[in-house]
Image (cartoon, grey):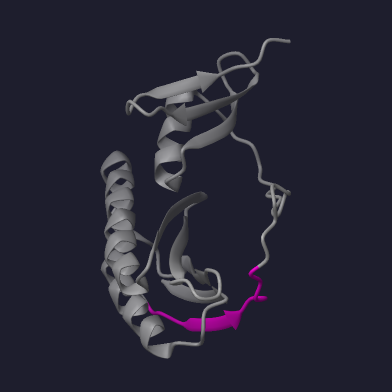
Amino acid sequence: MITKFKTKNYGDNKRIERVITSKLEVLNKFVPEDTIATVMLKSFGKEGEQYKFTLEISIQVKGQTIRSEHTSYNMWDNIDIVIPKLESQLTKIRKKKGEYNTKPNSIIVESEVDFPSNENYNNKIVKVKNYNISIITPDQAIEEMELLDHSFYVFLNAEDNKVSVVYKRMDGNYGLISPEY
């Protein structure tokens, strides 16, 4: 697995990079050796208040993105929450597809610093994300949503050829939004 680090408002900390890299080694049994794991370390907060830290790890595995993110007042706690989540997601994929990786893996660490910003955006669009839309069934969309650790997933419904959204409800069930036009 190749590990790449990105930071946003987070100081250069080689120790945390070494710890995350070593803890990610537990995932080597699930992925091919050329798999890229992108680790985003973020900190944010206002002057005079305690800063919060976010750890986000995304892994591209055979055309699928596995992602987990957690925010708390301690980056070290985030590590202990995010990596087991990723392991659980990869275990689900392995059980579903019956695939195991037996190749030895190597890790390369690349660090880059993002732009610092602590502005208050007041309900403005601050990020636009484009992605390829999948033609899948609602059940497959739920699986993708769970693997990405998101609360919703936009897809092209293979059953009725409409752009639809599945989402996780507060009661733990799922909902489907399908437009009428």
- Which residue is at 67% across, 60% downward? 120
Quarter holding the C terminus is top right
Farthest front residue?
Answer: 48
Q: Picture coordinates of residue 57 (x, y %)?
A: 44, 63
State whether residue 142 is above or below residue 119: above
Q: Picture coordinates of residue 47 (x, y %)?
A: 55, 75
Question: How many badges with numbers are in the image?
Answer: 0
State whether residue 115 is above or below residue 170: below
State whether residue 74 is above or below residue 167: below
- On the rendered structure, is 117 left or right of 31? right
Closer to the camera, 92 or 51?
51
Residue 71 painted magenta? no
Q: Picture coordinates of residue 32 (x, y %)?
A: 40, 64
- Which residue is at 31% across, 63% downward? 83
Residue 15 visible in this rendered orientation of the protein: yes
Quadrant housing residue 98: top left
Magenta region, main secondary structure? loop
- Which residue is at 50% across, 71% downward? 43
Quarter holding the N terminus is bottom left
* Magenta-drawn segment: 106-118
Closer to the camera, 122 or 144?
122
State whether residue 10 is above or below residue 81: below
Residue 107 painted magenta? yes
